[in-house]
Amino acid sequence: MPPDMEWWLVAIISFVCGFFSLFWLWKEITFVKRIDPQTKAPKFYGMAIAGIIGGYLLVILGTVLGAAMESGLVMIFSMLGMAVVLGGYVCLILGAFKMRESIHNYYTTVEPMGINLMDTTGAVLTFFFSIFFFQYHFAAIAKQKKAMGHPAA
């Protein structure tokens, strides 16, 4: 059974407490990993977290060393850090699209639920609002399963 909290409630709580969105993303990734053990989404999300944190640490290191040494060469750390951060955000987007692919494949072949995530609208919503877009579909699937009398409901 997918996580069945309404997407708008996830959005409101995430707006009030930003760390909730990370928790909910982890919950969605865990569920997708259960339905598709071969998915690459967790690896991409792990690389995204490492890239973003590591990149910002490089920027801070470059800033501190630049202030201490008064040299322009130290700015390379800051530029490299921003490149690593950018790579982290690219991995974040790739992870969302891998997750979308896994959800679509499972709910169109293994457990047909009549959802289509692979259209153009799905791609745009995955790019900008992946957590809430996936949760919208998870809540609809959970509601449908409860109506059918699924044993996990």
Image: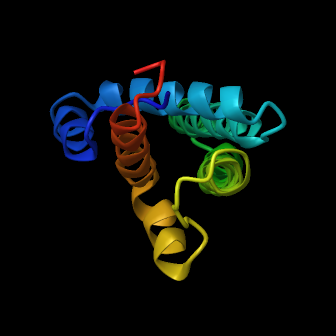
Q: From what the image shows, is residue 1 above or below residue 98? A: above
Count the marks: how many?
A: 0
Q: Looking at the image, which residue is at 25% across and 40% down?
A: 6
Q: Looking at the image, which residue is at 55% across and 67% down?
A: 116
Q: Nearer the viewer, residue 68 or 124?
A: 124
x and y percent of residue 17 in the render?
22, 28
x and y percent of residue 113 in the render?
53, 53
Q: Looking at the image, which residue is at 46% across and 77% down?
A: 121
Q: Residue furthest bottom?
A: 120
* Image quarter (top left, top right, bottom left or bottom right) of the C terminus: top left
x and y percent of residue 25 in the render?
47, 33
**Relative side of 25 to 72, left or right:** left
**Relative side of 62 to 135, left or right:** right
Q: Residue furthest top?
A: 152
Q: Residue furthest front?
A: 149
Colouring method of the image: rainbow
**Relative side of 137 to 111, left or right:** left
Choose top left, top right, bottom left or bottom right for residue 40.
Answer: top right
Q: From what the image shows, is residue 45 above or below residue 126? A: above
Q: Nearer the viewer, residue 99 or 19?
A: 99
x and y percent of residue 70 in the render?
57, 41
**Relative side of 113 to 46, left or right:** left
